[in-house]
Amino acid sequence: MTKVLKFGGASIQDVDSIKNVVSIIQSFKNQKLVVVFSAIANVTNMLEKVVDDFVRQDSNPLVTLNQIKELHHNILIDLFEKEHIIFDTVNNLFLEIEWVLEEEYNNEYSYNYDQIVSVGELLSTNILSAYLELNDFSNNLLDARDVFKTDNQYQSANINWELTDKCIKEKIKDFPVVTQGFIGCTSENFTTTLGREGSDFTAAVLANILNAEKVIIWKDVEGVLNADPRFFSETQLIKQLSFIDAIELAYYGAKVIHPKTIQPLKEKKIPLHVRSFKDINKSGTIINSEINNNKKPSYIVKENQVLISISDLDLSFIIEEHLSYIFMLLSNFNITINLMQNSAVSFSICIDNHSHKIPLLIEEISKKFSVYYNMDLNLYTIRYYDDESISKVISDKKIFLEQKSRNTVQFITS
Ligand code: ASP
Ligand code: MG
């Protein structure tokens, strides 16, 4: 049965890590494999800078583009002989970005973003596929855009399941397959992206449609931890998680898995194994349909939050009509609420700080309501909390808002 392996950018950041990944893949020889790659480490961020420079026109996008070229070129010269065709392939991919940059900016930020940023995954997969071939691991490089059919909501495109199902079944016949995460294609053949960190989702969709036996996501951490090591000094590996718990953790902001990843796996009961590419002897975390009764606290932190409190101009009650208007605005801005709470006279929402959208949103709301807001806050979530875990989180912090349910408590703090 098919296995889907997904490697993120951190696993392919330089020549040594690429060689490590190749040896991991070789250890699955003779199995029906689909291997999904993200862009090489940091390349997506750098490509985003190219887009921003192109759009803002205050600095030259070619400066960062040249750094990205150099980074890839340095990897190529170590992995391949000078005559290898991969040098041309890579050059041609960069040309596609240059063509976009030569055009006058057309005010379609998200469209331009997708045309430019998607090249990161095209580069990494072409390089990895060729290097696997060189190491006697022949493989079929599949352009994900030939199978991942999406709408034209650029930067966060939604896949058309019916068409994608059909294309995947038609095009994926011979294994092993190497393909890009994160990218897709509209019905008019324009490239789209599925949202930052979307490669996990790509792997899950492939697994769902191919009825895979298992998905393995290879990370630079041991597996899913009960807390983010950037904020907590003591962390523990969670050995097994139910699909539901994994969805909740990802939703509250746990960084290990993209929130959309679990649903396609849960539907077909396909286990997800999160394990370390640095130490393949570690057992990692298994996410599957088994319910885990060992409910220890997990801690999740979302940084850079904005808390907006909205009240009626004459301090009357916030009624349904007001709420539906506020929700409509949020939906128009494509902003997700991380936490909300209402009291008699005010309604509060906590959202990510999308720097370009927040001032516009606040301006819109202020036309009808009075608005207070605080920036630079953190949203702490404790799943399966107890007194001890709560005091660990809030002891030294100023709390702006708190919300408790049976399994979860959340605090917005400065
Ligand atoms: N390369 C993309 C990103 O960094 C997609 C991914 O890594 O999943 O967001
Ligand atoms: Mg990634």
Image: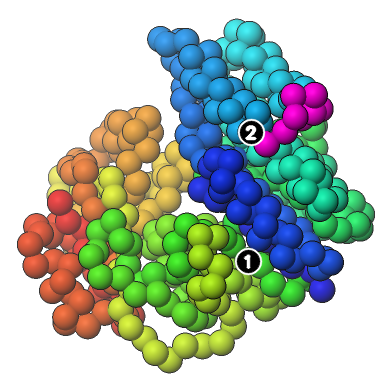
Is 102 on the left-hand or right-hand side of 293? right
In the rendering, at what x and y percent does residue 256 appear? 46, 60
**Dividing the picture into quarters, in which one does residue 294 lie?**
bottom left
Kind of element beneath mark 1: strand
Task: Determine if the magenta segment contains residue 378.
Answer: no
Task: Kindly identify which numbered label has been placed on residue 97.
Answer: none
In the rendering, at what x and y percent does residue 195 appear? 55, 44
Within 10 Å of the Cα at label 1, are there few (<14), some (14-19), or many (20+) other Cα atoms? many
Is 360 on the left-hand or right-hand side of 160? left
Pointer 1: what residue?
216
**Residue at point 55% right, 28% down?**
71
Q: Give the colouring mode of the picture.
A: rainbow
Task: Kindly identify which numbered label has been placed on residue 78.
Answer: 2
Task: Determine if the magenta segment contains residue 81.
Answer: yes
Q: What whole-number distance in Å separates the C-alpha atoms at marks 2 and 1?
A: 28 Å
Q: Quick check: 291 above or below 360?
A: below
Residue 317 visible in rendering: no
In the rendering, at what x and y percent does residue 216 appear? 63, 66
In the rendering, at what x and y percent does residue 350 appear? 29, 52
Where is the N terminus found, in terms of image quarters?
bottom right
Front tag of 2 and 1: 2
Query: In the image shown, does 158 or 122 lie closer to the viewer?
Result: 122
Is 387 on the left-hand or right-hand side of 228? left
Kind of element beneath mark 2: helix
Give the magenta range.
79-86
**Residue at point 37% right, 38% down?**
354
Q: How many marks?
A: 2
